[in-house]
Image (tube, rainbow, N blue to C red):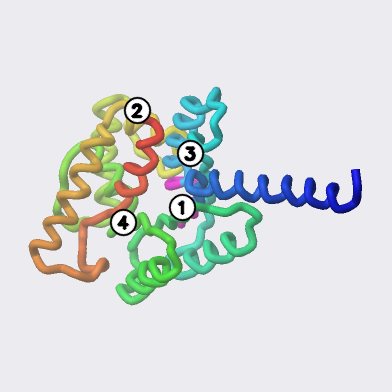
Amino acid sequence: MGTDDLFKKRKGRKLKRKENIRQMAPYRYLIVCEGKKTEPNYFEGIKQRIEIKYKDKIDVRKKIELEIEGTGRNTQDLVNYTLEIRSLSKNIYGNVWVVFDKDDFSEEQFNNAINRANENDIRVAWSNEAIELWFFLHFEYLDAAINRHQYIDKLNDYFSKYKINNGKYNKSLPEIFDILFKIGNVQKAIERSIKLRSSHCELGNITNCSKNPCTTVDELVKELFEYID
C-alpha cells in the first residue's frame, strides 16, 4: 500500500469517528446541578432506569448518555462553570442543562443567570423557590408561595404517611427518585408544573423571579422520560 493510500485510509477512519460523534451528540446530555446531592441524586435515579432499558441496545443512535455533576455553585457562577465544562470537554453535547433554585438569591442574580444560559444555548431547569417544589408536585398541586422549609414540612407528611426514611424527607437521600416515583406520580408532577406556569402567564407575570411558586424541572424530566417510555 502506498503512502497516499495509507493517508486516505487513516483520513477515512478519522472522518468516520467524527461522524459517529455527530450521530451520538443529540443523545448526549450534560446536566450541571447547583446542589451536590439533592438534584444529582434525583437525576441519577432517572439515569439508572434509562441505562437498564438500553444496556443491550446495539444501535448507538438509540442510546442516551447522561453526564450529571453536582457542584455546590449557584446561579451565574453555575452557568459560567457549565460553559467552561462544555468548552473544555472532548465530548460534543447535544443537550446542556443547568439545574438551580431561586432560594435567597436576588431577582437580578436569578434572572441574569437564566438569560445568560439562554444566550449560550444552555437550557435551565429552575425552581422558585426550591427543588422541593418539584418534589412536592409529585403528590399534589400547590400555588401558594412558601419557603423551602415549608416544602420540607409538607414532604415530611408524605414520608410519614408512607413510612419512608422514618417519616423524614432528607436532601441527601440517594434513592430520592425511586421514592418519589413509587409513592408519588411523575406524570402528574409534570402536569401540575405546566399548570403553575400557565397560571402565572394569566396573571401577567413575565419575569421568572416573579413566578412563585414555579418550576421548569418538568421540562428536563419529560425529555428524559421519553427514553424510558
Position of 203 with respect to 124 (left or right) is left
- Give percent across and percent down for residue 136: 25, 42
Taking the magenta stretch, the answer to whether it contains residue 28 is no
Q: Earlier in the sequence, mark 3 or mark 1?
A: 3
Quadrant where the image shows the N terminus: top right
Which residue sits at x=39%, y=59%? Answer: 123
The answer to whether mark 2 and mark 1 are in CB contact below 8 A is no
Residue underneath mark 3: 44
**12 is higher (above) or lower (below) than 184:** below
Residue 201 vs residue 24, the one in the foreground: 24
- Give percent across and percent down for residue 104: 34, 66
Q: Which mark is residue 127?
A: 4
Give the Cα distance between marks 3 and 1: 16 Å
Residue underneath mark 2: 164
The label nearer to you, 3 versus 1, is 1
Q: Circle 1: is it few (<14), some (14-19), or many (20+) Cα within 10 Å?
A: some
Instruction: Determine whether the residue tagged by mark 4 lies in a helix, strand or loop.
Output: strand
The answer to whether mark 4 and mark 2 are in CB contact below 8 A is no
Instruction: Determine whether the residue tagged by mark 1 lies in a helix, strand or loop.
Output: strand
Q: Which residues are magenta?
A: 31-39
Q: Earlier in the sequence, mark 2 or mark 1?
A: 1
Residue 200 vs residue 58, the one in the foreground: 58
Residue 36 visible: no
Residue underneath mark 1: 95
Residue 100 visible: yes
Q: Residue furthest bottom?
A: 108
Q: Residue furthest left?
A: 202
Give the Cα distance between marks 4 and 2: 24 Å
Which residue sits at x=85%, y=47%? Answer: 6
Amino acid type, residue under disc 4 in the picture: Ser
Which residue sits at x=34%, y=28%? Answer: 164
